Amino acid sequence: MAFPEDIGVEFVCPKCRTSVVRQPDAFICGSADCRLKYAIVDDIPRFLVDDAEQLAPEEWRQIVEVHGVQSGPSEA
Ligand SMILES: [Zn+2]
């Protein structure tokens, strides 16, 4: 299955509309205030705020720093 981002579409967090970071098994919200983790189950991302897990600040920072993501709703 191809993810929409593979054809140039970028996912955003359904809660805060910040771009998400792709992980092997999840998408991580790029917002330092939100930090929600959306699991990918059977190759299908579950962008459900109710099912999302909020990462600890340290854990979130390690992930987004690797990807060079800047927090905020848009990339200037
Ligand atoms: Zn978010």
Image (cartoon, rainbow, N blue to C red):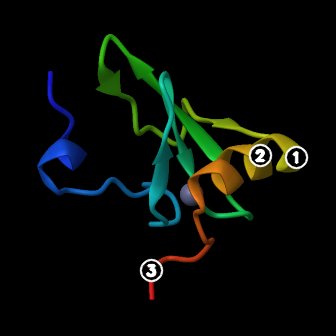
What's the amino acid at mark 2? Gln
Where on the picture, by quarter, is residue 30? bottom right
x, y (%) of residue 25?
A: 49, 22
Q: Residue furthest top?
A: 42
CA distance for labels 3 and 1: 23 Å
Local crowd size for mark 1, using a 10 Å CA cut-off: few (<14), some (14–19), many (≥20): few
Q: Residues within 10 Å of mark 2 (few under 14, many from 20)?
A: few
The picture places residue 41, in percent across and down from the top left corner, at 39, 15
Q: Is residue 35 visible?
A: no
Residue pictured at 51% horizontal, 33% vertical: 23
* Quadrant location, ligand no. 1: bottom right
The three-letter code of the residue at mark 1 reads Glu
11 in relation to 40, above or below: below
At numbered mark 3, what does the secondary structure look like: helix, strand or loop?
loop
- In the displayed structure image, the side of residue 60 where residue 68 appears, left or right: left
Residue ID for mark 1: 58
Q: Are marks 2 and 1 in contact (CB under 8 Å)?
A: yes
Q: Is residue 58 above or below residue 50?
A: below
* Residue found at x 42% / y 55%: 14
Foreground residue, 70 or 12? 70
Q: Is mark 1 within 8 Å of ligand 1?
A: no
| On-image quarter of the N terminus | top left
State the residue position of label 2: 62
Q: Is residue 36 left or right of residue 25?
A: right
User: In what element is the residue under mark 2?
Assistant: helix
Q: Is residue 1 above or below residue 30?
A: above
Q: CA distance from mark 3 to mark 2?
A: 20 Å
Query: Is the Cβ of the residue at disc 3 closer than 8 Å to that at disc 1?
Result: no
Q: Residue 75 shows which numbered tag?
A: 3
Q: Is residue 46 left or right of residue 72?
A: left
